[in-house]
Image (tube, rainbow, N blue to C red):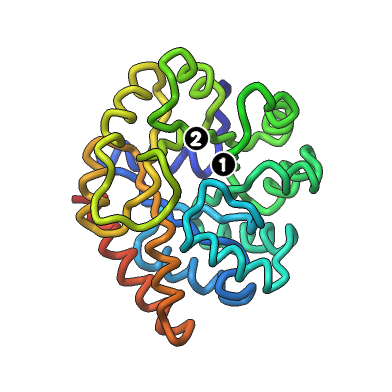
Amino acid sequence: MVEFDTPLARLFSRTKSEKRAALIGYLPAGFPTIEGAPRVIAAMVEGGVDAIEIGFPYSDPVMDGPIIQDAADQAIKNGTGASDVFDLVKSTAALGVPTVVMTYWNPIERYGVDEFGSALMAAGGSGVITPDLTIEESARWAQASVKSQFNRIYVIAPSTSESRMPLVTSQCSGFIYAASLMGVTGTRNSVSGDARSLVARIRSGSDLPVAVGLGVSTGDQAREVAQYADGVIVGSAFIRLIQQSATIEEGCERVRELAASLSAGVRG
């Protein structure tokens, strides 16, 4: 896989030189409102988040648990569409942080494969995470990524076989998304014990950075994962704070505080 010189790739080079993991925050576009999403992301960045993962709201998010599903449903009710996703990518990238989109395949196909890649790069995005796209069905997507030069990120699960692992990792760029457990996104009291062994399995056949997602919600958990992974992905914990807050101002302040705790964790 050819590695492209994106802000995301440069971030992992920098964090490696700093001997720490990168902190990646997730938020669906259009949540809690189309206007409010940039404010939440700004709070994440102010708190110390290194990169942002923007979710494309989708009606059947098979990888996501109830917290993110509720947020995506709210975003859809708010009328969030592709243009809003790319507008959020643009405003987020303007903050100086690498920005990627996490989307299921259907929205890409509906938008147009080449067109999606072109729109992403025009907005200043670095890459796309596609949790439900298999390598066997990725030919058009691979061509689009080479054409527009964005990072193509696939998800590796604990169930991924030893024979399949190199087939998937060889098609990734930017980083490899390691799902810490067999399940859906959400906050948990502890990070799955499968995460460390999965990262080790991935690293045995790939030099790409590995970022762990699913289940991280506290500074202590971030510190634990940062001991063996190159990146820590947090989504549900941020979203839950917004859902539990009476106002966007209160939510953003709580998001900023959590980001600072997580940031201290990955630097611990």
- What separation in Å lies between label 2 and label 1 (alpha carbons)? 8 Å
In the depicted structure, whether residue 248 falls above or below residue 43: below
Q: Amino acid at mark 1?
A: Ile
Q: Quadrant of residue 187?
A: bottom left
Q: Which circle's residue, 2 or 1, is located before the other in the chain?
A: 1
Q: Secondary structure at mark 1?
A: strand
State the residue at coordinates (31%, 71%): 257
Counting from the top left corner in percent of width and height, residue 218 is at 26, 59
Q: Secondary structure at mark 2?
A: strand
Counting from the top left corner in percent of width and height, residue 28 is at 56, 61
Identify the residue at the far bottom of this view: 246
State the residue at coordinates (68%, 72%): 77
Counting from the top left corner in percent of width and height, residue 241 is at 39, 72
Pointer 1: what residue? 129
For the residues labelled 2 and 1, say whether their Cβ atoms are less than 8 Å apart.
Answer: yes
- Residue 188: mark: none
Front one among 242 and 153: 242
| Front disc: 2 or 1 | 2
Name the quarter where the N terminus is drawn: top right
**Residue 57 relative to residue 218: left or right:** right
Q: Amino acid at mark 2?
A: Val
Q: Residues within 10 Å of mark 2 (few under 14, many from 20)?
A: many
Q: Residues within 10 Å of mark 1 (few under 14, many from 20)?
A: many
Front one among 262 and 106: 106
Query: Does the rendering let one see residue 203?
Result: yes
Counting from the top left corner in percent of width and height, residue 169 is at 49, 23
**Residue 80 relative to residue 176: left or right:** right
Pointer 2: what residue? 155
State the residue at coordinates (33%, 38%): 230
Query: Does the rendering let one see residue 14?
Result: no
State the residue at coordinates (52%, 74%): 39
**Residue 47 relative to residue 102: left or right:** left
